[in-house]
Image (tube, rainbow, N blue to C red):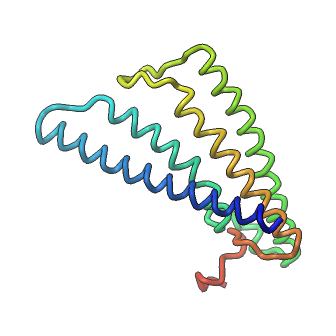
Amino acid sequence: MKHFDQIVRWLARVGIGLAAIALLASLALIVYSVVMRYGLNQPIAWVDELVGYLLVACVMLASADALLHGEHIAVDIVTERLSARGKQWTLRMGLLAVLVSAVLLAVEGWDMVAFARMVGLLSNGYLAVPMWIPQALVPIGASLLGLAAFVALIDTCRGQRPASPIEPPKSLGLE
């Protein structure tokens, strides 16, 4: 299990790295588009479409790393009042919900990709991208999120304290 954990954490780091690259590419494309539109009066029509796909990449590829570092949004109005045991059970149930949701999203995402590929679906924008390419980010990111949720769930069941939104990591000094 130790090697599996290391592989998932490595994949999450790769995902966050790719998400960062997608975010920087989005920034560069937006700057390029603004300069072309307002500086040279030559708008670039395809930039908005590509930036939209890169935004999907950012969200889907970064979610696993965010989960493993306890950076997902949490509503703690109830959980902050729970005992340590209650917090652990809440964390476990939340991770289980993420795992189930990620599996469903991955399965349905692969079906969506297969359908788009089968019918040759192209984007309506200027790029005319085969839609299965940007759509593939959904099941890939969901699979990675599911693996991260599984690792975090196993850690909590073993009594290890993974980073969680319920209990901030000690490095933040928010205890």
Q: Position of residue 135 (x, y in %)?
A: 57, 32
Q: Is residue 117 left or right of residue 107?
A: left
Q: Residue furthest front?
A: 3
Establish if 81 lies above or below 40: below
Tell me which corner region of the image, top left, top right, bottom left or bottom right, holds residue 62. bottom right
Q: Is residue 136 left or right of residue 36?
A: right
The residue positioned 25% from the left and 40% from the top of the image is 33
Q: Is residue 50 left or right of residue 62?
A: left
Query: Can you say which quadrant of the picture contains the N terminus?
Result: bottom right
The residue positioned 16% from the left and 31% from the top of the image is 42
Query: Can you say which quadrant of the picture contains the C terminus?
Result: bottom right
Q: Residue furthest left?
A: 40
Q: Position of residue 127 (x, y in %)?
A: 38, 25
Depth order, front residue of 127/42:
127
Q: Is residue 137 left or right of residue 105?
A: left
The residue positioned 66% from the left and 78% from the top of the image is 169
Q: Position of residue 47 (x, y in %)?
A: 33, 35
The residue positioned 39% from the left and 32% from the top of the image is 49
All told, the count of numbered labels is 0
Q: Position of residue 39 (x, y in %)?
A: 12, 42
